[in-house]
Structure formats: C-alpha cells, structure tokens
C-alpha cells in the first residue's frame, strides 16, 4: 500500500492539509506534545520581508525603523546576499505559522513540524512564557495598539508620535520587569487616583481614549494633574518605561499610553531573549524526530528525506572559532545537540553519563525528560544542568582566562572533572541576560524641587557604559522626563 504523502516538490493546499494531519498525529500521539490550536498561512517573499521588518508580528503600528529594516532586507535579498527564513511563528493562541510560498513540499512539511508543533509546544508550556505572556490576548492588543498609534498620528502629528516612539524604543531593553509583576498600589491610593482622574476627565473628555477592545486591560494612566506624580513610588525601580509612564511631569495622556504599549511589547518579547537556545533546540529536535518517523513509516520518499537532511544539517552547522563565519554559538546547534544528547543518555548511557546524570540516565523516558526540561528551564539553567562531558568534547570546548594587561591567554579549564564543570558554568553565564544587560535603575526623583531624575548603573565586573551610547540614551530619557537626568555609575 502506498502511504506516501507527496512524491515531488510541488505543493497544493490539499497536500499540505494531508501532511499536516500526519505530522499532527506523530506530534500528539508519539511525542505527546501539548500545543495551542494552529493557524497555518502561506505568504509571499515580500510578505515575509514585511514580517521581518515589523519584529515578526502580524499587526504592528507604523514606525520609520520598520520601513528602514524592510528596505535593507529587501535589498540584500534581491541582490542574493541573504536568504529568507522558511517560516515565522507567532506566540499566540491560535499559534500562527507563516510558511513561505517558495518552499518545496518537503520544506513545508519540515517547517510545519518545526513551527506549528515544536515552537508551539514550547510557547505553551515553558514557565517563562506562561508567566510573562498572554497568548490569548496578544492579537487583540496588537490590533488596539495599531489603531491607537494611527489615531494619535492623525490627531497630534506623525513627527510628535514618532519622536515619542523613538525614545520608547531606545529604552525597550530597560522597559521590562525582570523579577516581579508591576507593583499594585493600595486600595486607598487607587480610589484617590480614580477621584482625581474623574475630576480631570470632566474637563478633558475625549472618545479617543476609549477605544480598547474587549478583554484588554484599560490604560493605566490618562491625563494626570501635577499633584498626582507618584512621589511615594517604590524605589529603586528597574523598569524605566514603567516609571516614566507613571511619574513623568512632561508626558501627555497619549504619550503615557504609547509608553505603555511599547513596554507591554518589550515584556512580551522578554522571555524569548532568555530562551533562544531552548526554543530553537526544541523546534529543531521535534522536526528532526517527526521527519525521520515519516520516513521510517514510508510516508515520504528517500529523496524528500535527503532534502530534509540537507536543510537540517545546514541549520545545525557550527563554524569553528577560526572560521570566518564564526560569530559565537549557533543556538540551533547547541540546543539540538543537547536535546539529542539527552535522548542518547536516556537510551544508551555510558558509565560517565550515569555519574553525571543519575536522575535520568538509562531510564528510557527521553520524552518525559525533555518535556520536563522544556517546561522548567531557561537557557542559562538548562546548560548548567544538562550539558554533558561528551557534548563538550564533541564541540571541543575549553575555557580561556584573559587579563587586560597580560601578554597571553591562560587556558583555565580543560577536559577533566573540574574542567568540565568550569566550562559548563562559564558557558551558562554567557546566556544570563542579567549579566549582559546593564543594570540601570531609578533611585530618586526630586518632584518637589527642580524635578531632576536620578539613575544608577551598577557596573558588571567594573565595565562602564559606552560613553556615546550612554549620552544618546540619556537624551531619550530626558525627552520623556522633561527635566534633567543624572546617571551615577557604581561598582557592584
């Protein structure tokens, strides 16, 4: 009996639907994945470029930087200097996967497995995504943001709106809550704010501020009288956009809501910065497993399998450090390598594996072990807990110690018991965004005097901010605050 899903590179929607159902059966019944409902869309190369330019979101407000990105990416693509991604996937419910219409049928199958089931499962189950993102509400919120910014441009002028967005975008990395939810004011404080806001809105009513879609949290701040600045705000405050939105003496109501939109988007993307290795590793491991099962069950041809393997090996290729293409670790290579290694340790462990991973080595439950890791770890902790000596040898990892005034590097960790642990810990620290992002916090605001805003930067390992970048970003903060801003750099 011929079980082949397709026999050549051409695709149509019936073939895609048939292939999707076969992949879904393996994903849900063999791998026991738990996914959001899927929405598959086929898009053109120009639409894919448009998705690139608007940070891969299907609905976005207008901003000049998106057009600049589109022009650059289109120029590189048309000239043959860069290729397009095979897919774009959105962390939403339903999970939206964009497939490029130029893909062959084999590639359509691969990216359905990769995006619609690998990424989808990871989005739905990882604890950081569950904690910080709202997959059910993001599309409605984006639609609101797009309408809101367009209405502001029409009413207040494109230049003023883009200037506010420029400053907000410059602070996006400093516009997230890293360790806690937004602080909730006391009940008495809320009632007092509502009373003051009601008094103000009687004087300045505008239907524009009542355009939120159903189910989305209303704007936190409308027009605020001068005496409503949160002088009693809890300090220090790590989220600069949140503090400016709530306390800036200079912002108008629409500017406060614009800052709120940008910081909500920054918070939505915050988990992805901590999960690049795991997210791509999960999706790559899932597509590799599913495509091989399709071949083993006679559902794709040998030619299709070879095409898939050619693409897969390109995706997980890791250049040597002396290679001109080297730019650090390929997250696909490291993530997939670790997950394939976990399966090996579960099924065919060595005595070394049993010493390092007694909790799952030889137990056979590689699906359960991987699903637990996908759910409960981020890149830093995943590497710290699961990177094996074998994989360190395969990647030929070692550690170098460099001192600025030394004449040579020192090899500080090699392939021995202590060296493996040191290499693993050092590699894990590279994925700690707490060490990569500058620790800048609001430490004071003279609201009753000259309204100077005071910031502090706790230097990581004595490294100060780059002076030119620091001055540019401080200019954006001063624009949003409306008064002087002072930054103190402190050794941590």
Image: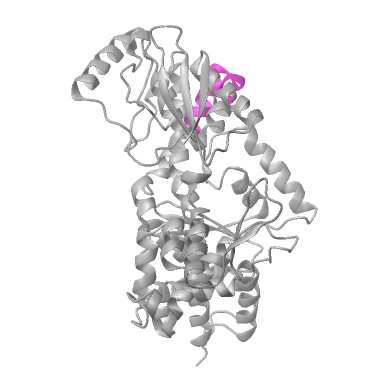
Q: Residue at x 61, y 48 (%)?
A: 52
474 w.r.t. 299: above or below: above
Q: Which residues are magenta?
A: 144-162
The front one of 371 and 453 is 453
Q: Is residue 10 left or right of residue 183?
A: right
Q: Residue at the spot x=41%, y=12% of the render?
A: 446
Tell me if residue 20 comes above or below residue 54 in the rendering: below
The x, y position of residue 391, in whole percent, is: 53, 73
Total marks in image:
0
User: Which one is nearer the viewer's eye here, 269 or 75?
Assistant: 269
Q: Main secondary structure of the magenta part?
A: helix
What residue occupies the far bottom of the structure in this picture?
A: 1
Instruction: Please tell me whether residue 151 belongs to the stretch shown in magenta.
Output: yes
- The reply, left or right, for residue 421 in relation to residue 300 is left
Query: At x 36% / y 68%, what residue is drawn?
Result: 371
The x and y percentages for residue 459 are: 51, 36
Viewer-nearest residue: 196 or 171: 171
Q: Position of residue 190 (x, y in %)?
A: 24, 22
218 sits left or right of 441 in the view = left
Q: Is residue 97 above or below residue 199?
A: below
Quarter location, residue 197: top left
Residue displayed at 34% across by 29% down: 218
Q: Nearer the viewer, residue 436 or 472?
A: 436
Residue 11 visible in the snapshot: no
> Residue farthest to the left?
188
Farthest residue in the front direction?
406
Place of residue 300 in the rendered image (x, y in percent of width and height, measured from the top left) = 56, 82
In the displayed structure image, the side of residue 8 where residue 78 appears, left or right: right
The magenta stretch spans residue 223: no
Viewer can see residue 384: yes
């Amino acid at each position: 009996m011929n079980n082949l899903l397709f026999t050549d590179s051409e695709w149509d929607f019936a073939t895609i639907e048939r292939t999707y159902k076969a992949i879904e059966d393996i994903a849900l019944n063999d791998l026991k994945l738990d996914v959001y409902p899927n929405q598959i869309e086929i898009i053109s190369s120009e639409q894919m470029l448009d998705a690139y330019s608007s940070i891969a979101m299907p609905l976005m407000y207008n901003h000049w930087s998106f057009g600049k990105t589109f022009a650059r990416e289109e120029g590189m693509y048309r000239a043959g200097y860069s290729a397009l991604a095979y897919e774009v996937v959105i962390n939403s419910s339903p999970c939206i996967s964009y497939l490029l219409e130029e893909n062959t049928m084999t590639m359509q199958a691969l990216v359905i497995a990769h995006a619609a089931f690998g990424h989808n499962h990871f989005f739905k189950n990882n604890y950081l995504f569950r904690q910080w993102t709202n997959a059910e509400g993001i599309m409605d919120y984006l639609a609101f943001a797009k309408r809101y910014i367009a209405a502001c441009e029409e009413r207040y002028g494109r230049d003023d709106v883009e200037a506010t967005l420029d400053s907000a975008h410059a602070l996006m990395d400093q516009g997230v809550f890293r360790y806690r939810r937004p602080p909730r004011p006391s009940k008495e404080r809320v009632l007092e704010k509502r009373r003051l806001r009601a008094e103000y809105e009687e004087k300045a009513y505008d239907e524009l501020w009542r355009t939120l879609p159903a189910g989305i949290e209303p704007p936190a701040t409308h027009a605020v009288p001068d005496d409503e600045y949160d002088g009693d705000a809890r300090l220090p405050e790590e989220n600069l956009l949140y503090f400016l939105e709530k306390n800036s003496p200079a912002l108008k109501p629409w500017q406060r809501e614009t800052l709120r939109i940008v910081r909500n988007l920054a918070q939505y993307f915050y988990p992805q910065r901590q999960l690049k290795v795991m997210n791509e590793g999960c999706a790559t491991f899932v597509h590799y497993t599913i495509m091989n099962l399709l071949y083993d069950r006679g559902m794709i041809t040998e030619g299709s399998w070879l095409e898939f393997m050619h693409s897969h090996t390109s995706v997980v290729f890791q250049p040597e450090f002396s290679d001109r293409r080297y730019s650090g670790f390929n997250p696909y290579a490291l993530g997939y390598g670790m997950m394939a290694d976990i399966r090996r340790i579960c099924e065919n462990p060595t005595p070394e594996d049993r010493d390092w991973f007694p909790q799952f080595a030889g137990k056979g439950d590689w699906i359960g072990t991987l699903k637990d890791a996908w759910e409960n770890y981020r890149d830093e902790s995943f590497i710290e807990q699961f990177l094996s000596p074998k994989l360190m040898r395969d990647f030929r990892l070692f550690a170098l110690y460099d001192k600025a005034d030394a004449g040579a590097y020192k090899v500080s960790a090699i392939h021995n018991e202590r060296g493996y642990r040191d290499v693993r810990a050092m590699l894990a620290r590279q994925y700690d965004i707490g060490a990569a992002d500058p620790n800048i916090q609001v430490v004071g605001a003279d609201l009753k005097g000259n309204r100077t805003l005071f910031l502090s930067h706790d230097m990581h390992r004595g490294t100060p901010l780059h002076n030119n970048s620091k001055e540019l970003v401080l200019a954006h903060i001063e624009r949003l605050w409306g008064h002087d801003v002072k930054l103190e750099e402190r050794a941590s």
